[in-house]
Amino acid sequence: MVAIRKKLVIVGDGACGKTCLLIVFSKDQFPAVYMLTMFENYVADIQVDGKQVELVLWDTAGQEDYDRLRPLSYPDTDVILMCFSIDSPDSLENILEKWIPEVKHFCPNVPIILVGNKKDLRNDEHTRQELAKIKQELRWVPR
């Protein structure tokens, strides 16, 4: 049986948890140390609706130094994972200011999945204060 091949590109600010997410998904292990990513690829073989899928995972660098190289990752993308870190309100703001415009420009019809990483840091006191400020600024109302 021939596997279906799909390409997933993950984007977001530097140090927001993109590489860890992909390593845990593809290798079922959590990296012990932080690794600065330039551009890495991983492959995960998965079953979807009884069909074999080869999911090619493209890990991109979020740092501004790589803004000119990152677009090389976008051709033939099937889905975008757009990440922010729950303990970094700036990374969430950058979703609107940087990542959505960039992805919409290079991948106008590609589905986007928004992912909040580092939820284990949500209850950190500094994080709670920063998230509370954002909620107030956005006049967020829980539903």
Image (cartoon, rainbow, N blue to C red):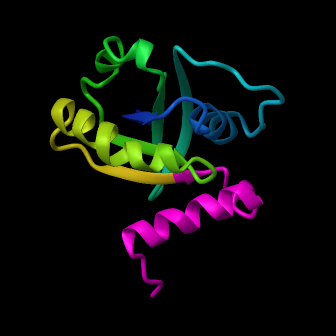
As drawn, 50 above or below 24: below
Looking at the rendered structure, the number of numbered marks drawn on it comes to 0
Q: Examine the image and state in which quarter residue 106 appears.
A: top left
Q: Residue furthest bottom?
A: 143
Q: Is residue 103 left or right of residue 80?
A: left
Give the residue at x 78% y 31%. 31
Residue 88 percent coordinates (x, y) = 58, 47
Query: Is-magenta flag for residue 138?
Result: yes
Q: Quadrant of the N terminus?
A: top left
Residue 104 percent coordinates (x, y) = 20, 39
Residue 89 percent coordinates (x, y) = 52, 51
Foreground residue, 89 or 120?
89
Q: Is residue 138 left or right of residue 26?
A: left
Give the residue at x 49% y 52%. 115
Foreground residue, 68 or 111?
68
Magenta segment: 116-143
As drawn, 35 above or below 134: above
Foreground residue, 84 or 89?
89
